[in-house]
Amino acid sequence: MLLIQGVKKGFHVGGNRIPILDIPRWDVGRGEKIAIIGPSGSGKSTLLHIISGILRADEGEVHIDGQALHRMTEPARDSFRASRIGYILQDFHLIPSLSARQNVEIVMPAQMGAAERRKRIDHWFERVGLGDRSRHLPSQLSRGQQQRVAIIRALVNEPPIVLADEPTGSLDWETADEVTDLLLELCREEQHTLIVVTHDLNMANRFPRRVHIGEINQISGVKRLAESREERAI
Ligand SMILES: Nc1ncnc2c1ncn2[C@@H]1O[C@H](COP(=O)(O)OP(=O)(O)OP(=O)(O)O)[C@@H](O)[C@H]1O
């Protein structure tokens, strides 16, 4: 479902290229649920950005669901992301002036009829236990409830792959556990592939597969520093 091959990514800072990712090959099967763990600055978010097409790798290939992301133009990647990838962030990124249900509705296909849209939204809000809250503004919801709305928004278009960057990072531990269980449950029901980046070992331990970023990425912090020094010396 996901294949990354020969991917390299670096950032230019002050005239030097700092290598961040060097991934010979990483394969993820359809429906897998994976938690990626590893130290701060080791490239976990950068990896998610490359999988989602927000960032382009300097070299290498990214295939999702049979599509070659690395060959797409930026607008094509944007539209692929909108329709085929669910993305969940630590800070929810809900639009404050829209109700919870409107925050979901804006990502749904424009050609879908109003009645069908309403039915799907009602179903999802019931499913995550927010049946009576869908007309509330984000500011009227708790953080855990806001993350549930963000989860609906990520899943409502039935993307084959769901990516989450620290989805429990701003929740207390009890709410974090609830949100983790809900996310895993929904992704199991719908057979989504789920890749989560997290510092929360409690969250990671709930996943059937945990991967340390060092198993995927050949560049460690020490190597990164050494390589940027070498490049500076040339
Ligand atoms: N746009 C950018 N320009 C320069 N350097 C960047 C840029 N984005 C990320 N970096 C650097 O790339 C490295 C990896 O960042 P990334 O956010 O992927 O790490 P991470 O493992 O997700 O960290 P954390 O766990 O703290 O979120 C860091 O050293 C960061 O400073």
Image (tube, rainbow, N blue to C red):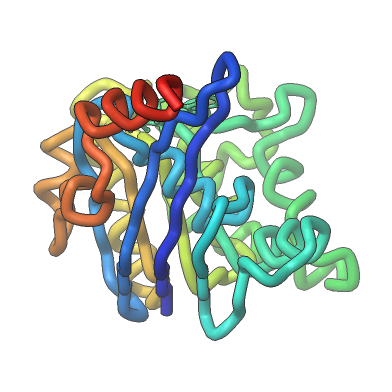
The answer to whether residue 190 shows anywhere in this view is: no
Residue at the spot 63% in from the left edge and 47% down from the top edge? 54
Q: Position of residue 15 (x, y in %)?
A: 59, 20
Residue nearer the viewer, 213 or 192:
213
Q: Quadrant of ligand 1?
A: top left
Name the side, left or right, on which 43 lies relative to 120: left
Residue at the spot 56% in from the left edge and 51% down from the top edge? 58
Above or below, 191 relative to 183? below
Q: Quadrant of residue 68 in the image?
A: bottom right
Residue at the spot 77% in from the left edge and 31% down from the top edge? 98
- The N terminus, quarter of image: bottom left
Name the side, left or right, on which 57 lies relative to 75: left
Above or below, 21 relative to 114? above
Q: Position of residue 176 (x, y in %)?
A: 27, 33
Q: Quadrant of residue 85 in the image?
A: bottom right
Q: Position of residue 29 (x, y in %)?
A: 31, 79
Name the side, left or right, on which 7 lies relative to 222: right
Above or below, 228 relative to 120? above
Q: Which residue, as the protein is rendered here, is positioned at the far top? A: 14
Residue nearer the viewer, 76 or 203:
76
The answer to whether residue 139 shows anywhere in this view is: yes
Residue at the spot 79% in from the left edge and 63% down from the top edge? 73
Residue nearer the viewer, 34 or 51:
51
Residue nearer the viewer, 212 or 107:
212
Q: Quadrant of residue 124 in the image?
A: bottom right
Q: Position of residue 71 (x, y in %)?
A: 68, 71
